[in-house]
Amino acid sequence: MRRTTWPVYYDDEFANKALVTELTTQWHHNLGINVRLLAMNFADYLPKAMQAPGFDGPFRLSYASASSSPSDYVGDLLTAASVDTSNATRFVDRTVEQVFAHEAATHYGPRADAAWHAIEERFCTQLPLIPLTFNDQVWAWRSSIGAALGHRLDRATGLPLLRECYRRVG
């Protein structure tokens, strides 16, 4: 049975609606795919993304790694240890785990680059994720600025958590 309309879920914070609207407009014009956008607040979105059975259609997910190191994003997004925390896709592959543990994380330079490429290739051939955007952001913080929970940046968006920050006195 072929669906005529697909639900597309997204977190309704930040610029997610504009991004998902533009993407799904292109899907419709170029592929003939009809969609129904379903905005969710983050409190409802996160449990659905992180727990089985998950979403019944495409969903917009963003993630900000703790650093620009491939080890951080591969460890957070593609390993069994991070399933139901930051690995929302629940992707688990023994080969990826072995390459990650024994090659990529222990070597530097061209040998590590080849291992990272192998991990990404294997992942992309097995799981239908479509990278939409990529960016690198750097934020400068004065030493007098603290964070209530210890994190100044949101792990999902990479944006400053201004509501969590405060100015230290003294």
Image (spheres, grey):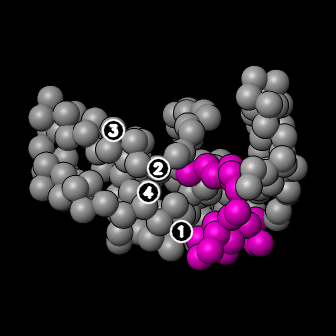
Look at label 4 and name its amino acid.
Answer: Leu
Label 3, secondary structure: give it: helix
Labels 2 and 4: the sequence-earlier one: 4
Labels 2 and 1: the sequence-earlier one: 2
Q: How many numbered marks are there?
A: 4
Measured Cα–Cα span from mark 2 to mark 4 = 12 Å
Look at label 1 and name its amino acid.
Answer: Gly
Rendered location of residue 68, percent (x, y): 40, 41
Near-viewer residue (44 or 164): 44
Return the residue at label 4.
77
Return the residue at label 1.
150
Crowd band around label 4 with a 10 angstrom C-alpha radius: few (<14), some (14–19), many (20+)? many
Labels 1 and 4: the sequence-earlier one: 4
Label 1, secondary structure: give it: loop
Label 2, secondary structure: give it: loop
Mark 3 and mark 1 residues within 8 Å of each other at the beta carbon = no
Q: Residue furthest front?
A: 1
Return the residue at label 2.
127
Checking the image for residue 121, the label placed there is 3
Does 49 lie within the magenta span?
yes
Q: Nearer the viewer, mark 3 or mark 1?
A: 3
Labels 3 and 4: the sequence-earlier one: 4
Visible residue check, residue 142: no
